[in-house]
Image (cartoon, rainbow, N blue to C red):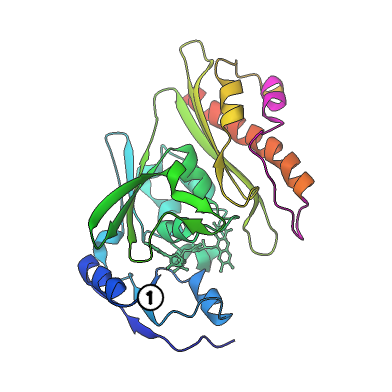
Amino acid sequence: MIPAEFEYRAPATLDEALGLLAATPDAKILAGGMSLIPALKHRLAQPPLLVDIGRIAELEGVSVRGGKARIGARTTHATLLRHPDFAEAPIFADTASVIGDVQVRNRGSFGGSLAHADPGADWPAVFLALDGEATLAGPKGRRTLRARDFFVGMMSTALAGDEILTELVLPLETKRAGAAYRKLRQPASGFAVVGVAAQVALDRKGRIDRVAIGVTGVNAVPFRALSVEKRLVGQAPDSAALRALCASVDEVDAVGDLYASAEYRAHLCGVFVARAVVEAIARAARA
Ligand SMILES: Cc1cc2nc3c(=O)[nH]c(=O)nc-3n(C[C@H](O)[C@H](O)[C@H](O)COP(=O)(O)OP(=O)(O)OC[C@H]3O[C@@H](n4cnc5c(N)ncnc54)[C@H](O)[C@@H]3O)c2cc1C
């Protein structure tokens, strides 16, 4: 289908973009367009104005300093896949490499994925497991939001219509710590039927000291598997025992669709939590 008519602006500064959003109710931000353009074509979205943020330099780029990754919201999946600063944090390549196809990875952005909050999107699981923080710019200035407060419903976030997600800050644990993302892809689109990110830190005896697990694709809203995290603390890294402890995830309230019933998704959730945790432990043991 052909989209409804809209105005298009591509400001060069964040202030200009915020001014355009404030002046036009229902205006939409355009990042990579990989989710928004299909929605426009199906007329699921009919904004009067598109504010393209692709020319705002401060929204792009990656830096890793002081144990924290700072990622500009407009940074593409492909940049995160190849970025040399993430050589010691392979969870970024794990995740970016399984998003869609080459075109989607070259155009789609980290911030766009979080803002769109598709229930099958991959980055939300990583954002939750690494306990990230989002910076939002709006007409009243900037505010920050923890990952756990960011996703509020199905395809719905705490971002207001006149705010722009500018940057994501993700703490990276390195000492005896590892993180991994494991996913079952929907075969046509690549979206997650189930996707799990896990970060594990081991104590001096090699037991699990800290663990955080983010899950996407299962419920309508991505979540932290706090019940499993609690069960795993203090456990030895024995794969068989870990698989049993990961098998049931109390937070699951699975959605069923053409690709997987709710029961199958709930089962897969336990399987993929175990896979991500086992790989995160293996990486932690090498760190
Ligand atoms: C064929 C196909 C396969 C895909 N497969 C996968 C997959 O396997 N895994 C996966 O995770 N995703 C997948 N995607 C989605 C893809 O990752 C998108 O890039 C992503 O969801 C949206 O990012 P974008 O930059 O394209 O945002 P856009 O499409 O430009 O925007 C999406 C929404 O977010 C808002 N938005 C964007 N940026 C900001 C910002 N900085 N601040 C506030 N609001 C903002 C927009 O207004 C819009 O409402 C797929 C998409 C396609 C078309």
* Residue 267 occupies quadrant: top right
Q: Position of residue 70 (x, y in %)?
A: 31, 46
Q: Is mark 1 within 8 Å of ligand 1?
A: no
Q: With respect to residue 115, does 276 lie above or below?
A: above
On whether residue 82 falls in the magenta region, the answer is no
- If the image is split into quadrants, where does the N terminus sit? bottom right
Q: With respect to residue 262, does 50 lie above or below?
A: below
Query: Which residue was labeled with disc 1?
Result: 27
Q: Position of residue 147 (x, y in %)?
A: 43, 44
Q: Position of residue 284 (x, y in %)?
A: 49, 26
Prevailing SS of the magenta stretch = loop
Q: Is residue 26 left or right of residue 67?
A: right
* Residue 110 occupies quadrant: bottom left
Q: Secondary structure at mark 1?
A: loop
Q: Is residue 188 left or right of residue 44?
A: right
Q: Is residue 264 left or right of residue 190?
A: right
The answer, for residue 37, to whether it is visible in the render is: yes
Q: Which residues are magenta?
A: 241-261
> Is 187 in front, or is 33?
33
Counting the numbered discs, the total is 1
Residue at 48% x, 50% y: name it: 151
Residue at 61% x, 22% y: name it: 231
Q: Position of residue 114 (x, y in %)?
A: 46, 55
